[in-house]
Image: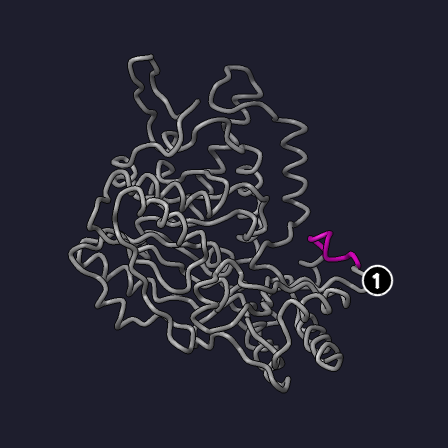
Amino acid sequence: MMNDFMIDVDNIRKDFPILGREVYGKPLVYLDNAATTQKPQCVIDCISDAYRNVNANVHRGIHFLSQEATDMMEAARENVRSFIGAGSTEEIIFTRGTTESINLLASSFSAAFLKEGDEVLISGMEHHSNIVPWQIQARRYGFRIKVVPVTDTGELDMNAFHSLLNVRTRLVSITHVSNVLGTVNPMSEIIREAHSKGIPVAVDGAQSVPHISVDVRELGADFYAFSGHKIYGPTGIGVLYGRKELLEKMPPYQGGGEMIRRVTFEGTTYNDLPFKFEAGTPDYIGSIALSSALDYVRGIGLDKIAGYESELCSYAVRRLGEIQGIRFIGKAPERCGVVSFMVRDIHPSDIGTLLDRLGIAVRTGHHCAEPLMDRFSIPGTVRASFAFYNTFSDIDTLVNGLERVIGMF
């Protein structure tokens, strides 16, 4: 393949211990990276070393370990800021992941800015995490949710997007990359158009940050959320970026320790950003390990990763397209990370179960995007999703496995 020279996949794979194991006596072929990525040894070691050497609650202690853990957590915050191009560490809020980030945003933004008669604009390809939190707040505050439709090729209907923006729209919240279709949405155009009408934009970056270089200021995003576990970091840690001037107007999402400046029974004043939104003991070990994962990705280079993974996706589409009766769900010209498909009338779960016995891990089902499944009138898909440690032979193994599965029906 053209981009094989860009990264040394064989050596990279040695950094991921789990890729050397077998499943049902077969070498593991892991193609479920959109759900979660595997962890390099440096991240595993970072977690172990942090618990072994610097485990102490942050921001509150005057003793050496607490100070050291605090310094490491705040260095991680600075690393995240640099990685996504934010202007200040005050704009980097650590959360448990994209889901909590969007729940925080929906709760606090709605409390500050939304009322009955207002509208929030999302899209028809959203993960449930960017649908349900807005529905919960819509019931509370009386605003309406409008939906940008998805075309037959799996792209946003941009004509509909432009027409749906109006004087009642208070926020646009849209995924950067679809976790089902792999579609890379035209965020620059979306943000430019929304900003021309004074409307802020929130971006679900769970599927974009692992695959493409993201600069939130260059993009113009007002909010941007992503998860550590999808970019080779640990589970239970994520990030919400928000523009300082908006975050300052938003009330806290949760109450407790650290998010306060002064507490009395008569009332409470809140801490400065970002701590106003980080109640309780944070996952400081997770933030430190996330920083290690970002360093690892940096060491390979996001441009190289994007180029190699693009070749993987193109090869997968070509090879899978050779299978008689396959139907791709989503054919956007610009996509990354995933290929979703169905084969004849075989239920996706049956395909996934049989592939699993061959050592091939794919995801099947609705992928937490049931409205999108309804749009295409399907029960679910088989989804193969890629990372830079995947190989072209992994895709060949998938195709051979599918041919065996089809033969059983």
In this rendered view, identify the residue nearer to me: 79 or 240.
Answer: 240
Horizontally, residue 191 falls left or right of residue 327, namely left
102 w.r.t. 121: above or below:
above
Residue 12 falls in image quadrant: bottom right
Note whether 165 is above or below 42 in the view shown. Answer: below
Q: Which residue is found at the position 50% from the left and 40% from the top?
A: 96
* Relative image position of residue 244 (x, y in whole percent): 29, 39
Neighbor class of circle 1 (other Cα within 10 Å; few <14, some 14-19, many 20+) is few
- Quadrant, the C terminus: bottom right
Relative to 313, is 8 above or below? Answer: above
Determine whether, in the image, residue 62 is placed left or right of residue 91. right
The residue carrying mark 1 is 25
In front: 336, or 252? 252
Does the stretch in magenta take in 18? yes
- Is residue 47 rendered magenta in the image? no
Q: Colour mode?
A: one colour
The percent position of residue 266, horizontal first and vertical second, equals 29, 13
Please name whichever residue, 302 or 177, is drawn nearer the observer in this view of the structure. Answer: 177
Q: Which residues are magenta?
A: 14-22
Look at 15% across and 56% down and name the residue there. Answer: 167
Q: Secondary structure at mark 1?
A: loop
Please name the amino acid that badge 1 sits on: Gly
The quadrant in which the N terminus is found is bottom right
Q: Residue at x 67, y 71 (%)?
A: 351
**Residue at the top extreme?**
265
Residue lying farthest right?
25
Point out residue 52 in the picture as x, y percentages from the top left corner: 68, 28
The quarter holding residue 162 reads bottom left
Percent x, y of residue 403: 71, 80
Q: From the viewer's perspective, is 217 left or right of 392?
A: left
